[in-house]
Image (cartoon, helix red, strand yellow):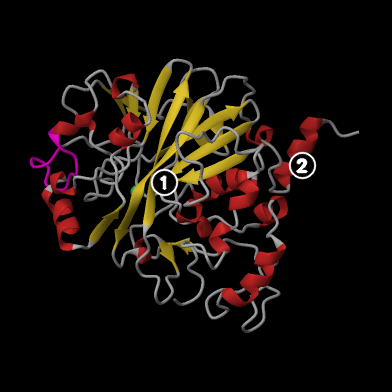
Amino acid sequence: MLSLQSLSLLALLGGTYASFHDFDIPRSHATVKVQAFNLGNVTLKETAHAFFHPVLPGHETSPSPVYAFLVEHKNTRLMFDLGIRKDTVNFVPSVAASFASGAFILNQFKDITELLQDGGVPLKSIDTVIWRLLDTYARSHAHFDHIGDMAKFPNTTNLVIGAATNISTFPEFPNSSLQASDFAGHNVTEINFAAINLTFAGLKAIDYFGDGSFYLLNTPGHLLGHMSALTRVTPTSFVSLGGDAFAHAGQIRPRPAFQKNFPCPAHLLEETASSISTDYFWSPHSRDGVFDMRSRAQQLLAISDVPDAFYVSLDKLAAFDADPDFFVVIAHDMSLVGSLPYFPASLNGWKASGLKERTVWNFANEANPAFVFSPA
Ligand SMILES: [Zn+2]
């Protein structure tokens, strides 16, 4: 008889992941509470090509939500990502100018500090803010939508950043979207993956609280030094906070392991036969004008074809996504707007409530704002 271990080895060899054990994640009963905020929609006009490929006519501009996450561990609260500040005039001048000119647009916006306080979470109770995507090269302003406004947090709130972070500030460093006010008075700690041996799905992992409840993952992609997080919300289920490791659900779905564990619902199989353009998308059993989702063995969207785009961690997060024990949320997943339970609800019950089954195919639904698979 096959032992459980050899079964999971077989699963790995077959390229499918059947449970979190297949990723070598240690067992633990320690969990964190994870709550999501949607700070509003941000639209960067005519920039879809910078995030995915192909961009079909009419989809050059796509609005994105901006999610931020409150993580509670025993009596400790931290924010994973702060999202974007709403007082866009106070960004560094070049970013502020993009908002002033209408190239960037914010809708229904509230600062994370308002949402926390409105929800009865005093800012002084936030021990730590984790910024997850600053890089050594500080490509101009690439991270302004995640750093919030640290000046609104009391000095007792610590700031955690990646070791590769270039903390030079504007105006001394003209390309930086950081300002002195982002650091003033805060204790800043660097996360360094260099000496880390623990890996999951090939990603370096730091056991942040030391009890298996919250891991920081080194997920270079979008920017060097990009971190994401893996949160244990029950002893056997996880929420993967993927940050900007990819931009659109169609960049990781549908792959074979995903199709196997999360088959496309019958009504969407039927709908996508005509809604997905076979001029741009194909699969072995597709015919001209009739797309066949079931036989599609790779994700619908590729990474951007813009020269400096890179998403090296995409395949690894896709492995989490295909596994029934993980719910993957990226920072700007449009397909989840309206489906993701926001604060004060928590994401901890995602598995028991069937949230993943209900939402993973949203992106392929013509009525969903993330649908970009036929000319508009
Ligand atoms: Zn972003």
Q: Residue furthest left?
A: 172
Q: In the image, is residue 56 above or below residue 114?
A: below
The secondary structure that dominates the magenta segment is: loop
* The quadrant where residue 320 appears: top right
Disc 1 residue type?
Ala
Can residue 162 be seen at all in this image of the molecule? Answer: no
Within 10 Å of the Cα at label 2, are there few (<14), some (14-19), or many (20+) other Cα atoms? some
Horizontal and vertical percent for residue 302? 48, 63
Q: Residue furthest right?
A: 1
Q: Amino acid at mark 2?
A: Leu
Left or right placement of residue 211 versus residue 309 in this view: right
Residue 47 tag number: none
Quarter of the view holding residue 18: top right
194 or 340: which is nearer to us? 340
Does residue 177 sit above or below 61 in this rendering? above
Q: Residue at x 38, y 26 (%)?
A: 78
Q: Which residue is mark 1?
A: 331
Relative height, residue 177 to residue 302 (above, below): above
Distance from label 1 to label 2 (Cα)?
Answer: 33 Å
Task: Report if the beta carbon of the residue with label 2 is closer than 8 angstroms to ligand 1.
Answer: no
In primary-sequence order, the first of circles 1 and 2 is 2
Image coordinates for residue 20, horizontal then vertical, percent? 65, 34
Q: Position of residue 19 (x, y in %)?
A: 69, 37
Q: Please tell me which residue lies in front, 63 or 179.
A: 63
Look at the image and tell me in which quarter the N terminus lies.
top right
> Mark 2: which secondary structure?
helix
Q: Residue at x 62, y 24 (%)?
A: 26
Residue identified by numbered label 2: 10
Tell me the SS state at disc 1: loop
Which residues are drawn in magenta?
Answer: 169-180
- 212 left or right of 269 in image: left
With respect to residue 118, does 226 lie above or below? below
